[in-house]
Amino acid sequence: MATTAEIRNGLCIEFNDQLFQIVSFQHVKPGKGPAFVRTKLKNLKTGKVIDNTFSVGTKINTVRIERRPYQYLYKDEVGFNFMNSETFEQVSIGAELVDNADLMKEGMTLEIMYHADTETPLTVEFPPFIEVEITYTESGDRGNTASSTALKQATVETGAIIMVPLFINQGDIIRVDTRDKSYYERVKK
């Protein structure tokens, strides 16, 4: 059992009989009235993000979560198959627990979050940035843009479609931010 004073980003809590991870929080001390903590909570089962406000001093149930490194192997009719990088144990995880599944490529190392008490997988977490090759994109025409931030669609080797700047060509390797599936930078060869 903890209090709102111990809230931090990434902390997992039990709230309304479900597991949530704190995405962000802000301690607010208004001029009039009691202080409170405004939070954004991500449901670990559904992935939905909700806003919630806790009064200062409120007791919260923290949950022990373990992050374990796994290597992505392949996808079949059951779900996605991973191998533990330390024990070589294989596990199959349903598609509902994997956000941005279209960014996974075979052999990629990911972290699977487990509820430590029940040993159930909660979610699959990507590294913040991954490198992928552009397999298809239209050629970008210079001069047909109204602003300097013109983007075009590009298909990457995993099948995902990413919006990229006009100067990116087929065969280029780019770094993608997995948190919002956005172009980050072109990787120099």
Image (cartoon, rainbow, N blue to C red):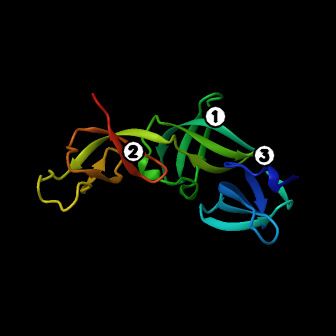
Determine which quarter of the picture holds residue 84. top right
Q: Earlier in the sequence, mark 3 or mark 2?
A: 3
Circle count: 3
The amino acid type of the residue labelled 2 equals Val
In the image: residue 78, left or right of residue 166: right
Question: Does dot 2 land on a helix, a strand or a loop?
Answer: strand
Q: Earlier in the sequence, mark 1 or mark 3?
A: 3
Question: Does dot 1 land on a helix, a strand or a loop?
Answer: loop
For the residues marked 1 and 3, what is the alpha-carbon distance in whole angstroms?
A: 22 Å
Name the residue rendered at 67%, 48% in the picture: 10
Residue 89 numbered mark, or none: 1
Name the residue rendered at 78%, 72% in the picture: 32
Expressed as whole percent of the image width and height from the top left, the position of residue 153 reads: 26, 56
Q: Which residue is mark 3?
A: 64
Name the residue rendered at 22%, 59% in the picture: 147
Q: Nearer the viewer, mark 1 or mark 3?
A: 3
Given the current orientation, which residue lies at the most extreme front position?
31
Of 98 and 78, which appears nearest the observer? 98
Q: Residues within 10 Å of mark 1 (few under 14, many from 20)?
A: few
The amino acid type of the residue labelled 1 equals Glu
